[in-house]
Amino acid sequence: MSVFGVSRMIRKDNRKAESTLLRLVRRFGFPVLSLIFGLAALVVILAPTVTSTPPYIVGENLVLTEVQVLPGFYMKPITFFQYSFFLCFGFALYTPYVRAWFMGVRAGVLRTVYLVAWLIAMGSGFEVMYHIVLWSASLAAEGFTNPDIVVNPWPRNPYPLNIVYAAKIVVLIFAMALFLIDYLQRVDRARTTQQTIELTRDELSDRRIRL
């Protein structure tokens, strides 16, 4: 076999390997990323929670400490949880299995999920504004120099709630709801396009049969 033939076979094998790798990445890339970020979020939220002993302020140990995420880059545990959980949720929606489910589910189910997503966005959107106002009012009234120690004493309970912790949770829920709304709109457009293509294909098949 000539040198040219060997070189062509090597290029062909390389293209096959690249194609196989690309298929694996498309199939397992998002599921793996979703799992990694989900486990990271779970670990960072459970570790301080398990080690806490009452009486305590809910979420304060996730706000007043910092963890090293990268060399020279530190982040509050609650912030790390917020980002990781959002990425886990986003990558999960774009896994082949979840997307295939949304593409094949009945229209009524899709509309129900869309309505619930807007309901969650409405509720969490109010909570975002509420915590901003409460945080600002507490800083002004009590004269805190550290905004991370502001506490919400309402409703009256033995475990007050840290405002920064609560605000990051409701912002996370609000962002996830908006992301889901946009995702469902994209799925709906893709379903409509797919149905139009299938309808056009059926019409062309009928015309060929008649001819």
Image: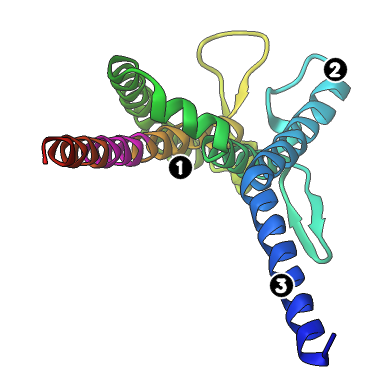
**Mark 2 crowdedness (10 Å alpha carbons): few <14, some 14-19, many ≥20:** few
Question: Considering only vertical position in the picture, is 186 above or below 127?
Answer: below
Residue 162 pos. (x, y %):
62, 29
Mainly helix, strand or loop, the magenta region?
helix
Q: Which residues are magenta?
A: 184-196
Q: Which residue is mark 3?
A: 12
Q: Which residue is mark 2?
A: 53
Seen from the viewer's position, the closer of residues 133 and 40 is 40
For residue 178, side relative to residue 71 (left or right) = left
Label located before the other in sequence (1 or 2): 2
61 in magenta: no
**Mark 3 crowdedness (10 Å alpha carbons): few <14, some 14-19, many ≥20:** few
Q: Which residue is mark 1?
A: 140
Label located before the other in sequence (3 or 1): 3
Residue 159 pos. (x, y %):
67, 14
Residue 107 pos. (x, y %):
28, 20
Residue 58 pos. (x, y %):
68, 23
Q: Count the numbered circles shown.
A: 3
Label 3, label 1: how far apart the Cα atoms are = 69 Å
* Residue 109 falls in image quadrant: top left
Label 1, label 2: how far apart the Cα atoms are = 31 Å
